[in-house]
Amino acid sequence: MENESINELDIYDFDHTLVPFDSGTRFIIYCYVHYPWCLLNLPVIAVGGIMLITKLISFTTFKQSCFSFMRLLPRERAIKGFWDKYAPRAYPWFKERERDCVIVSASPDFLLNEAKERLGFDRLICTKHNAKTGKILGENCRDEEKVRRLKEEYPDAKIIDVYSDSYTHDRPIFSLATGKTVHIEKGKRVEFDYKKVYGEK
């Protein structure tokens, strides 16, 4: 698909920004509760966690191991059931947006594609996975990778407002704002001055 020519966009992170939880983590827990045979994957996560702490594997590899239980799931039913429960918890102020937006998230595409339909995202950029195996395809969509993906998919768009809950991880996308930079704090939108938080771009 060719990149669209878009004049202006707002950027939103997803987890803890539009919803009050980390969707990937919450989905894993949901699956363990509703499909308990997925608990067979816990030793894989435990070993992966140790290897991550000891720097034997990357965070991306660890994240991949966390979703390796996907092959055990009735996938579509699990995803729909998850969003039946959690989509109503999205913050209602998102519906007040004034211009086209793109959600940029590290969460899995197989999970957020359904959220996009439910919550009415205009556009979505997130981590690509093999939905059957949980394997990550390409790079985990976080930090500078968010900016790279944005520029790849919308090279001519002017970024106006940027919303995220993370000062730490989302400086790269905050730096793109030509309008407002907005930190999400317990569901509330708090506008801040980029220069006072980070200094010059």
Image (tube, rainbow, N blue to C red):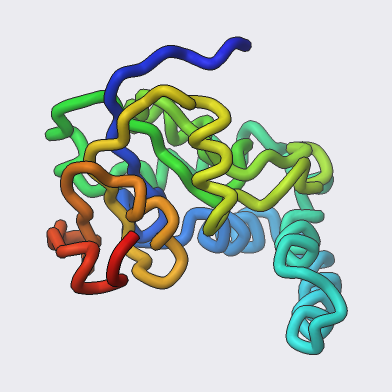
Residue 166 point in image, percent of width and height: 37, 66
Is residue 62 rendered to the left or right of residue 79? right
Above or below, 100 against 195 in this view is: above
Q: Nearer the viewer, residue 14 or 199?
A: 199
Residue 106 point in image, percent of width and height: 55, 52
Which quarter of the rendered picture does the N terminus lie within?
A: top right
Q: Residue at x 65, y 62 (%)?
A: 32
Which quarter of the rendered picture does the C terminus lie within?
A: bottom left
Number of numbered discs present?
A: 0
Is residue 37 among what the camera can see?
Answer: no
Is residue 80 among what the camera can see?
Answer: yes
Q: Residue at x 22, y 54 (%)?
A: 181
Above or below, 36 against 198 in this view is: above
Residue 143 point in image, percent of width and height: 53, 58
Is residue 31 rendered to the left or right of residue 123? right
Is residue 57 rendered to the left or right of residue 35? right
Residue 149 point in image, percent of width and height: 56, 38
Above or below, 45 against 25 in this view is: below
Residue reaching furthest front?
Answer: 200
Q: Nearer the viewer, residue 80 or 58?
A: 58
Q: Nearer the viewer, residue 14 or 132?
A: 14
Q: Residue at x 43, y 30 (%)?
A: 116
Q: Residue at x 66, y 52 (%)?
A: 140
Q: Nearer the viewer, residue 60 or 186?
A: 60
Q: Quadrant of residue 68?
A: bottom right
